[in-house]
Amino acid sequence: MPTFEIGERDFLLDGRPFQVISGALHYFRVHPDQWADRIRAARLMGLNTIETYVAWNFHAPTPDEFDLTGRRDLGRFLDLVAAEGLHAIVRPGPYICAEWDGGGLPAWLFADGSAGVRRHDPAFLRAIGDYYAHLLPVVAPRQTTRGGPVLMVQVENEYGAYPGVPDDERVRYLRELVRLTRSHGIDVPLFTSDQADDEHLGRGGLPELHKTANFGSRTTERLSILRRHQPTGPLMCTEFWNGWFDSWGQIHHVTAPEDTAAELDELLAAGASVNLYMFHGGTNPGLTSGANDKGTYLPITTSYDYDAPLSEHGAPTAKFHALRAVIAKHAPVPDELPAEPGLAPEGDVVLGRRVALADVVDALAGAGRTAQRPPTMDALGQWSGFALYRTRVEDDDAVLQVAEVRDRAHVFLDGEPVGVLDRTGHVAALPLPPRAGELTLLVEDRGRVNYGPRIGEPKGLLGPVRTARRELTGWEALPLRVAEAPALLDGALRPVTAPDAPLAGPSFHHGTFDAAAGTDRFLRLDGWTRGLAWVNGELLGRYSSEGPTATLYVPGPLLRDGANDLVLLELRGAASARARFVATPDLGPTEP
């Protein structure tokens, strides 16, 4: 059988020096019908390896299920990598960051407060053991030592950047992850990756694990730092940051292709191995995008294009060609190039049926509960999406104040909008109309924090909710199955008489459009404010007028010949009930 080993200065594939030239391609961010196309494009750029994270919570959305089918079929993805003649690197976390909801850690794991986060904690380690018992039997038979594509498996992720864990506990935790990994038949080399500074590399790994570094610039300096911490063996940049992610309300991040190419040339010329992060970013489908919070909460956009060499919709970019030219100086590159996608079909969509969310709460609601203080969404078993909170106020309550809202609450009094509480804007108080009535808060989880000490925090309303004169008690809280809305609401949607008139939310809107199966589309929602979009029952993700992203990518495999369904949940209001498909994506401005 083939072998892959860590030599004195090189990786050794079947005993011969092997320079890993890899690119990140996350199967969970790409429609499975497009996996083969994206993998082939990686080979045509000159890559010899595909790297993917594994998002634990994507496979285990609840404690009682573990799904390895369809979009979650990691085995099929790895088999397609092998079929293209490429190798693979698997990074199963358990924590991945990746700008993914909760950094890949399931929210249900921390709901009762008994499990520690990323430490040598019995409850946390038991859950990881169960996760590995489901996942690693998919990886083990696909290792290169058994004729498969998998060269290496990562242990944890950027652990040196995680604060608050004593060094001795870090070592015990990492060694237990190694033991668990090996116990499921993983015999290829294990490695860690940390940001390329002395602090992170010094505490993020183990002497017996191969250390790699993450960076996107100052290549020679960063490789020198890595060599101090990994005195022997091959140098590798596991995340060569050739782009960056976007957050709602910020700019679209881009990097100059020529600058990225020069850094990659320097890295490969030094004999180091590399994994481009990202080769192809793809999309954060549904409600899977994460968030960062370093004093201001910033949720990640639906698009994860990442300014990568292969764009969100699979088109080779200027960066693709620049990096391909660099790779060709150091390794064989095929003569063939990926096809350039044509312009997408354009057209308007009239969303001629609608229903107010308030009128369909019963159809959407899961099992609720009553309590003196509002329970968190986690206490309701609501791991993403929305929850509805209700209580009563009196005519002299005057103001509403919440200790903390995670992450946005649309506030109503007897169904009339009062305002919005917002975590990003640090808005935690609103004046109330001077009348008694039913107070309703529609609370939206905009993505769980994926980096830093706030990983594992609950969502919903936290702490006491007060008015000018008292704490509000006597709450009813309902989880809402919003992600499943199109399947639940079809009979409730009613025709509208004036689709060009402005409309108020929160409300659902439905329209149809003709399409050809397999042809990508780009959905533009000018005039709409913020909400969710579905095509043929598949939740594309969030949209927002705050940008930067101005279009949503609709993968061709979601479409069928003839009539297709578009559903929007608009949370605030829109200029009219019209949407538009446009020829090209618009990911937003690149300068403030």
Image: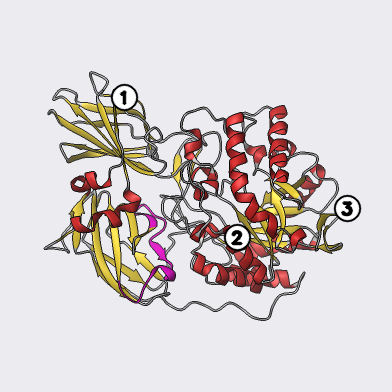
Relative to residue 474, is residue 313 drawn left or right? right
Give the labeled residue for mark 3.
8
Q: Residues within 10 Å of mark 3 (few under 14, many from 20)?
A: few
* Residue 456 place in picture, x, y as percent: 50, 35
Residue 321 vs 205, above or below: the answer is below
| Label number found at residue 359 | none
Q: How far apart are marks 2 and 3 (CA)?
A: 32 Å
Rate crowding at label 1 as few (under 14), some (14 to 19) or many (20 or more) other CA atoms within 10 Å.
Answer: some
Q: Residues within 10 Å of mark 2 (few under 14, many from 20)?
A: some
**Residue 491 colored magenta?**
no
Chain-order first, disc 1 or disc 3: 3
Q: Position of residue 441 (x, y in %)?
A: 26, 36
Residues in magenta? Answer: 540-563
Judge from the rendering whether residue 380 lies leftward or rightward of residue 252; answer left or right.
Answer: left
Drawn side of residue 136 relative to residue 307, left or right? right
- Looking at the image, tell me whether mark 2 or mark 3 is earlier in sequence order: 3
- Kind of residue sitting beneath label 1: Arg
CA separation in Å, label 1 and label 2: 45 Å
* Residue 548 among magenta residues: yes
**Towards the viewer: 254 or 276:** 276
> Sequence-wise, which precedes: disc 1 or disc 2?
2
Q: Residue shown at 81%/54% (left/top)? A: 234
Point out which mark residue 373 bears: 1
Report the residue marked by disc 2.
75
- Residue sitting at 15 percent across and 24 percent down? 394
Answer above or below: position of 511 versus 251. below
Q: What residue type is labelled 3?
A: Glu
- Answer yes or no: is residue 218 visible: no
Per the image, label 2 sits on a secondary structure element best described as helix
The image shows residue 583 at horizontal and vertical percentages of 39, 74
- In percent of width and height, residue 167 lies at 71, 29
Whether residue 368 is visible: yes
